Image (cartoon, rainbow, N blue to C red):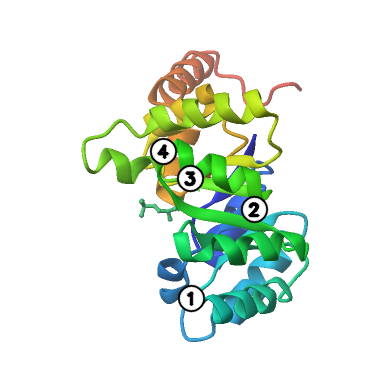
């Protein structure tokens, strides 16, 4: 399973990529807007930090022609860029053409099994169902991941299931159980999911017991 960071914070990306468990980054216009007035440089920096990772960068244009042109321009920023496009009815035709052009696409703001099926038919690289935003309106978002996994496997689609809008440990656990090909996590969620209070308690107990020996150096 690929693990992406859902942020454009370069310091955090640099820090957490050293752990060896990070396979890429998913940015969005909200993340990039927090990082100053040169988003292109921010994207370039992130692409260099993880040269073998997939770095998703979202379109910000809205008309069909401008989205198509911008998608090509974004893809040229670096070889590891994946162009993120919302799953909007106006963009199906554009997505179809971009896939034929060889552009790697991450379709974002996906909310249903049917949208996922249509995008897999078009041959996009990733689809990003938003789990947390379903939960926000009292619908169990995790269920959608199981449905998409089962549909992808049944039809043998090559599109990867990227679980997005994950807000906590329970969401990540569900995404792994559902068989997501990739997940994307905000930094605070990553931190929460990497540790466990019982691990910390266990370490304290082992260390306290060990210190009773009064040994200065081990092994000698
Ligand atoms: O990757 C999608 C993510 O950025 C959206 O998350 O928590 O705003 O629903 P959220």
Q: Quick one: label 1 or label 3, which is nearer the N terminus?
A: 1
Q: CA distance from mark 3 to mark 2?
A: 24 Å
Q: Nearer the viewer, mark 4 or mark 1?
A: 1
Instruction: Give SS at disc 4.
Output: helix
Q: CA distance from mark 4 to mark 3?
A: 31 Å
Q: CA distance from mark 2 to mark 4?
A: 19 Å
Instruction: Give SS at disc 1.
Output: loop
Q: Nearer the viewer, mark 4 or mark 3?
A: 3
> Mark 4 highlights which residue?
192
Q: Quadrant of the C terminus?
A: top right
Dot 4 alpha-carbon crowd within 10 angstroms: few under 14, some 14 to 19, many 20 or more: few
Q: Quadrant of residue 154?
A: top right
- Is residue 219 in sight in this rendering? yes
Q: CA distance from mark 1 to mark 2?
A: 21 Å
Does residue 15 appear to the left or right of 20 in the view shown?
A: left
> Mark 1 highlights which residue?
60
User: Residue shown at 67%/26% (left/top)?
Assistant: 217
User: Residue shown at 62%/75% (left/top)?
Assistant: 68
Q: Quick one: label 1 or label 2, which is nearer the N terminus?
A: 2
Q: Nearer the viewer, mark 2 or mark 4?
A: 2
> Mark 2 highlights which residue?
24
Where residue 125 appears, as percent x and y from the top left, is 67, 49
Q: Quick one: label 2 or label 4, which is nearer the N terminus?
A: 2
């Amino acid at each position: 399973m690929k693990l992406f960071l859902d942020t454009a914070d370069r310091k955090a990306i640099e820090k957490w990529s050293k752990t060896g468990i990070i396979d890429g980054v998913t940015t969005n216009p909200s993340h990039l807007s927090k990082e100053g007035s040169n988003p292109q440089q921010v994207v370039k920096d992130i692409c260099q930090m993880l040269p073998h990772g997939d770095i998703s960068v979202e379109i910000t244009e809205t008309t069909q022609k401008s989205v198509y042109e911008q998608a090509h321009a974004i893809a040229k920023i670096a070889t590891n860029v994946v162009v993120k496009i919302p799953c909007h009815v106006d963009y199906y035709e554009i997505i179809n053409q971009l896939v034929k052009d060889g552009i790697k696409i991450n379709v974002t703001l996906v909310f249903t099994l049917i949208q996922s099926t249509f995008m897999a038919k078009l041959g996009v690289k990733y689809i990003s169902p938003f789990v947390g935003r379903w939960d926000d309106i009292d619908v169990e978002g995790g269920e959608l991941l199981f449905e998409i996994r089962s549909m992808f496997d049944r039809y043998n689609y090559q599109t990867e299931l990227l679980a997005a809008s994950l807000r906590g440990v329970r969401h990540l656990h569900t995404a792994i159980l559902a068989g997501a090909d990739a997940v994307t996590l905000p930094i605070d969620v990553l931190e929460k999911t990497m540790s466990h209070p019982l691990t910390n308690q266990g370490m304290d107990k082992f260390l306290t017991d060990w210190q009773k020996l009064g040994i200065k150096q081990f092994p000698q």
